[in-house]
Each structure stands twice: as structure tokens, then as C-alpha cells.
Image (cartoon, coloured by chain):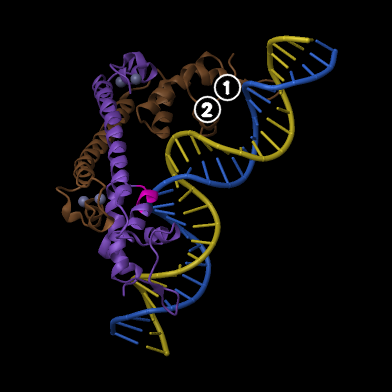
Chain colours: A purple, B brown, C blue, D yellow
Amino acid sequence: MFSIGQLSKQTGVKVPTIRYYEQVGLLVSAGRTEGNQRRYDKGGLERLGFIRHARDLGFSIEAITALIDLQQHPDRSCQEATLIAQHQLTDVREKLLRLKALEAELVRIADGCDGEGNSEECYVLASLADHQHCRGEH
Amino acid sequence: MFSIGQLSKQTGVKVPTIRYYEQVGLLVSAGRTEGNQRRYDKGGLERLGFIRHARDLGFSIEAITALIDLQQHPDRSCQEATLIAQHQLTDVREKLLRLKALEAELVRIADGCDGEGNSEECYVLASLADHQHCRGEH
DNA sequence: TCTACAACCTCTAGTCACTAGAGCTTCAAG
DNA sequence: CTTGAAGCTCTAGTGACTAGAGGTTGTAGA
Ligand SMILES: [Zn+2]
Ligand SMILES: [Zn+2]
Ligand SMILES: [Zn+2]
Ligand SMILES: [Zn+2]
């Protein structure tokens, strides 16, 4: 049995975050001591590892809840899991596209001024004031 | 003079968002009617356009506040503006790196299962349970 | 001039995934 | 048995909005 602090050390998830996961129904402790402290078993440790990894990959709490639910039922079809993963991939790709466009404009903007002049003639400020300066959409 | 709704239409910024910008000190109306409705002048329209564009480029409210402050003082050095822009670029590049790593892992994960099996042997679930499956860090 | 109603107002609360802090209690080592 | 690290609950704050309730104002047509 592990205390919440031991679980935290082993997974790298902060103690208040573990309590937060309990609050939103993602991870319930195996039980409590007489003095009301949480105790976890190996299953809890693994579940928290799963949560941690999925969060690192950008999955939402809601998605992780569904994935864990699926994991608890080994006989169910895994179709939902693949759909969730594909959705997450789509999401990441959309963000990538957006960020790439931003990067291109920001390079132009940041490189357009050396910071030696005054704000009246600053290319950074002029670029922000008018999207016409931009090469593309973003 | 424009009403808040006209400003909204011309900039594409939603009415409640404009009020929110006022609340955080980014955009103050030129005045109010007798009946307490906001009225904006051309300067307000331009300022909101600036805010909109900077937000689209990912600048924080705090950064935009500093940029507008600088813009109001044409005689001041624009060094801070370039620093803010460079910081934003760095930020975007960090996010890009992270997302590229995520994309690589998610492609592997999402392609690893066709969703036809059951959750017990699902590659998606197995990959999420154990970072060892991952090709790299993320 | 009256009336209808779209647009405006303020205020509170909710979103997401935590994070910080106050004030208290429990566990475990010495 | 004492001490102090670690635990507990509860509330509130983060960023940048968004939604809704419940009331008021502006304006166009009759
Ligand atoms: Zn400059
Ligand atoms: Zn632009
Ligand atoms: Zn599968
Ligand atoms: Zn991994």
C-alpha cells in the first residue's frame, strides 16, 4: 500500500493533482487509514501511470475517463479507443498547422526590427496593427 | 461613434469579449450615452483591431497591454516590443517541438490498432499504459 | 407619439486542468 | 512520548473568455 506522497514520487504527478484526479472521478484510492489518509494499491499506481502518460500526450480528462472505462472491460470492443486516439491526432495536427503559420509570421515580425528605433516607426508594432503586413492567413 | 455591436461586427470580436477587454483594462470606450451604453471612436476601433490581430498571433493579454502602452508613446524606444515578439516566437517554437513529438507518437498509436479487436489486446490502450512503447520523449 | 423588440447593461458563474494557501490532523521515526 | 513531515479539507486563483439571468435603452415603423 502506498501513501499519496509515495504515489506522487513514483509517477511524477504532484500530490494536489492526484487529489484533483480523485475529485473528478479519474482515480479513486483503494481505501483510507483510520486517520482518513488515502492508501493506494498497485492497481492505483498503474492507473495513475496511465493517466500521466495520456495527459503527457495531450488527451483530455474526459477522454482519459473513457479510455480507463474501456480498459476496465477487457471484453468490450476497442473501437472507441482508436476513435479517441485519432481525434487526438487530428487535434494535434490542427494545432501544428496553426502554430506553423504563426511561426512564419512571427519570424518576419521579430526579425523586422532590431529594437534600436522608437516605437513610432517600429515594424513590430506596425505589423501587429495591420494584418495586411502578413504573408498569409493565421 | 460606434456602438459595441458595430465594433464587434467590424472586428469580428464578440461583444462579451469586448466588455471583457474593458474589464481587464485593455480597451476603454470613448464614453457612454445618457442611457449608459458604450460608444467608441475611430481610435477605439483601431485599438481593438490591434488587439484582435495580436491575440490571433498568440500574444497574451499582458503582452498586448505592454505593446499598446508602448504604441501610445511614439517617442519611446521599441526595444520592449521586439523582446516581446521574440519571446512569443520562442514560445511558439517550443510548442511546435512538443506537438511534433506528440504527433509522431500519436500516429504510431492511432495506426497501431484498427479498432476491430477488444480492449484487452488493444495497442492504443497498451501504448498509453506504458511509455516504453514510445519511440522518443514527449 | 407610441410601441415593439433588438441590442444594450451588470453581475454571477462556468470552462479546463490544475495550483496555492490557510488551518487543522495524523503518521512514523527517534 | 515528542516532534515535524506529510496528510487532510476547503476555498480561491489562473487565462481568456463564454453563458445566462434579469433588467434597461435605442431606434425604426405604424
Ligand atoms: Zn521596433
Ligand atoms: Zn496577420
Ligand atoms: Zn484497439
Ligand atoms: Zn510515451
Residue B96: x and y in percent read 24, 36
- Does residue B131 appear to the left or right of A132 in the view shown? left
Up-down: is A20 above or below A106? below
Up-down: is B98 above or below D27? below
Q: Can residue A111 be found in the magenta stretch?
A: no
Question: Which residue shows up at 25% across the image and 39% down it?
Answer: B99
Q: Quadrant of the N terminus of chain B?
A: top right
Ligand 2 picture quarter: top left
Proximity of marks 2 and 1: CB atoms separated by less than 8 Å: yes
Residue that badge 2 annotates:
B18
Among the 4 quarters of the image, the one containing residue B35: top right
Q: Residues within 10 Å of mark 2 (few under 14, many from 20)?
A: some
Question: Which residue shows up at 28% across the image and 70% down it?
Answer: A42
Residue that badge 1 annotates:
B4
Residue D12: x and y in percent read 53, 52
Up-down: is B123 above or below A105? below
**Along the line of sight, the residue nearer the viewer: A75 or B65:** A75
Question: Which residue range is magenta in the image?
Answer: A60-64
CA gap, disc 2 to disc 1? Answer: 8 Å
Q: Which tag, 2 or 1, sits closer to the chain's start?
A: 1
Determine whether the residue tagged by mark 1 lies in a helix, strand or loop: helix
Residue A88: x and y in percent read 30, 42
Question: Which residue shows up at 27% across the image and 53% down it?
Answer: A53
Q: Chain of mark 2?
A: B
Q: Are marks 2 and 1 on the same chain?
A: yes
**Along the line of sight, the residue nearer the viewer: B74 or A66:** A66
Amino acid tagged 1: Ile
